[in-house]
């Protein structure tokens, strides 16, 4: 057990370093630095953006810590960061805790996939009843009739299902439980929609990075992670049954179909927990950057506005290759307008 634990820790560290390495202790001429923290879901894309922007702008350092959506929201409330990030957006109650207010910006979108470690099984199909049952702890073996029914001709092993879930307050978990609650009345009752639910089953791992590592190390495992993590590690992803009864694989096109009906109100927070389109992947979401409405440091304010504009325009070109969904032009336009809501405080220096 000790050897296995060390191996898992090492693998987690490798994956975390791949995705969320900080921008480094770069010495800058002007010393303008932004500190951000939050969701692990978009961390690979954010790191790409921030590294590219810093490399092309002298005197700029942007550091982002992947600590989970719950940590990102708390950091904004505690004012220990210049910006936060959350896949669960931010509740009205939490927004009210921030003097001066916050501005949320949808920055990218992606799928949440169910990846698994099952030797010899490719193209696994999971019905809504099957994957809801797995995370309720009711479907316990891989050859359960609910799974076998959708996988005719596949040799499913008589092997326990090792469920892996998030150990931290997670926006990925929030979106996943929001979907499960939409498709399963039993799940909606308990544990329900939550960033840190009381799961009835499963081994806990921290971050998308940790869940990815746990699944890779554990035979018979299944867990939920962001599509880009599974794609980068070449992990198998189950085809999930959508509301129209179709088994759909995660892709840019199927996620775009899922999010096509999202309507953004003034606060720019929108959800599509169970998309109806025939070609829609069933679990897709936007993810948000959280900024303060006012900044007291002029240099940071100017840098943040320029950085945000870059992210929602030229930065979107990096999305697809990393497993994210480029923002539709209508959402980009809303972001550009919302960036102007972020202002310099009257007593700024």
Image (cartoon, grey):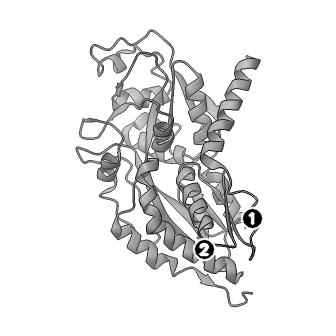
Disc 2 to disc 1, C-alpha distance: 16 Å
Residue at position x 65%, y 39% from top? 206
Q: Secondary structure at mark 1?
A: loop
Element under disc 2:
helix
Tag 2 residue: 304
> What quarter of the picture does the C terminus occupy?
bottom right
Verify CB contact (< 8 Å) between mark 2 and mark 1: no
Q: Which mark is residue 205?
A: none
User: In the image, residue 200 lies at what x, y percent?
Assistant: 56, 29
- The reply to whether residue 117 is in sight is yes
Residue projecting furthest to the bottom: 346
Give whichever of 192, 347 is nearer the camera.
Answer: 347
Q: From where the camera sits, is residue 101 visible?
A: no
Residue under numbered circle 1: 80
Other residues around mark 1 within 10 Å, as few (<14) / some (14–19) / many (≥20): some
Q: Quadrant of residue 61?
A: bottom right
Quadrant position of the N terminus in the picture: top right
Q: Is tag 2's residue or tag 1's residue first in the polypeptide sequence?
A: 1
Indicate left or right for 80 with 336 as reference: right
Q: Position of residue 122 (x, y in %)?
A: 37, 22
Picture coordinates of residue 117, whole percent (x, y): 49, 23
> Please, is residue 75 above or below residue 174 in the view?
below
Q: Which residue is drawn at the image coordinates 30% and 19% (left, top)? A: 151
């Amino acid at each position: 057990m000790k050897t296995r634990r060390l191996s898992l820790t090492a693998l987690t560290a490798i994956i975390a370093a791949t995705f969320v390495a900080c921008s480094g202790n770069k010495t800058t001429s002007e010393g303008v630095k932004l500190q951000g923290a939050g969701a692990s879901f978009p961390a690979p894309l954010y790191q790409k953006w921030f590294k590219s922007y810093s490399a092309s702008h002298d005197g700029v350092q942007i550091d982002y810590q992947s600590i989970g959506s719950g940590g990102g929201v708390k950091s904004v409330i505690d004012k220990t960061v210049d910006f936060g990030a959350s896949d669960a957006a931010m509740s009205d109650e939490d927004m009210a805790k921030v003097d001066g207010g916050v501005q949320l910006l949808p920055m990218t979108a992606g799928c949440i996939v169910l990846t698994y470690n099952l030797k010899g099984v490719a193209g696994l199909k999971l019905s809504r009843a099957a994957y809801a049952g797995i995370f309720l702890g009711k479907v316990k073996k891989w050859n359960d009739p609910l799974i076998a029914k959708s996988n005719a001709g596949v040799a499913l092993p008589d092997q326990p299902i090792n469920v892996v879930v998030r150990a931290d307050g997670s926006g990925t978990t929030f979106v996943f439980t929001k979907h499960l609650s939409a498709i399963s009345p039993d799940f909606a009752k308990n544990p329900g929609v939550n960033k840190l639910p009381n799961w009835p089953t499963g081994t806990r791992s921290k971050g998308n990075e940790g869940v990815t590592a746990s699944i890779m190390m554990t035979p018979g495992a299944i867990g939920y992670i962001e599509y880009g993590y599974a794609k980068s590690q070449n992990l198998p992803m189950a085809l999930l049954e959508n509301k129209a009864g179709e088994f759909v694989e995660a892709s840019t096109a199927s996620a775009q179909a899922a999010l096509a009906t999202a309507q953004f109100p003034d606060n720019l927070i929108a959800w599509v927990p169970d998309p109806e389109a025939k070609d829609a992947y069933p679990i897709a979401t936007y993810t948000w950057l959280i900024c303060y409405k006012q900044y007291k440091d002029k240099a940071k304010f100017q840098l943040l506005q320029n950085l945000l504009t870059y992210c929602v325009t030229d930065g979107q070109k990096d999305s697809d290759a990393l497993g994210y969904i480029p923002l539709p032009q209508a959402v980009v336009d809303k972001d550009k307008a919302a960036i102007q809501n972020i202002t310099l405080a009257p007593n700024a220096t």
